[in-house]
Amino acid sequence: MYDIAALEAVLRGVLADVPGDREIVVVAVMPSARNETTNGWAALSEREREVARLVRRGLINRHIATRLGISAHTVNYHLRRIFRKLDLGSRAELAAFSPPE
């Protein structure tokens, strides 16, 4: 139901850029039924699906940009569109969202 491994990967990616002397607060976000509305994963473009897969693996925008040969700004643009299309509010929700295999 929930992809715990994907959530852990996202957290590892986010925490990798946090200095060791900082306090970390982790908030659990559970996907709701609204994520399954309309077309879901099928509504995403192929590039948006690529970005979403890399977010689920825990990569940060800068690393996704390098891997895909695009700018970090473009990655952010794709993420905003993904969040809007899937009615999600965060990377953690995206990681928990289960796309079709």
Image: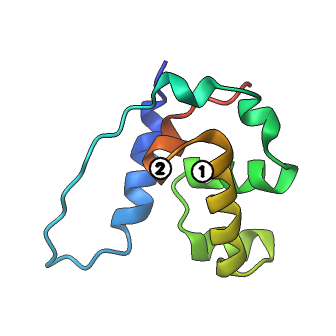
Tell me: residue 95, above or below residue 22. above
Residue 89's label in the rendered image is 2
Dot label at residue 83: 1
Q: How many angstroms separate mark 2 from mark 1 (CA)?
A: 6 Å
Q: Position of residue 18 (x, y in %)?
A: 30, 74
Q: Earlier in the sequence, mark 2 or mark 1?
A: 1
Q: Are marks 2 and 1 in contact (CB under 8 Å)?
A: yes
Q: Nearer the viewer, residue 50 or 16?
A: 50
Q: Which residue is pictured at 25% across the width and 79% down the height?
A: 19
Sort mark 2 into few (<14), some (14-19) or many (20+) by Cα contacts within 10 Å.
some
Q: How is the image coloured?
A: rainbow
Q: What amino acid is at disc 2?
A: Gly
Q: Dot 1, how many residues are within 10 Å of its Cα: few (below 14), some (14-19), or many (20+)?
A: some
Residue 60: where, in percent of width, then height?
Answer: 53, 67
Tag shown at residue 48: none
Q: Nearer the viewer, residue 88 or 101?
A: 88
Q: Quadrant of the C terminus?
A: top right
Q: Is residue 101 above or below residue 6?
A: above
User: 35 or 96, which is in the foreground?
Assistant: 35
Q: Is residue 14 left or right of residue 46?
A: left
Name, please, the residue furthest toward the top.
Answer: 1
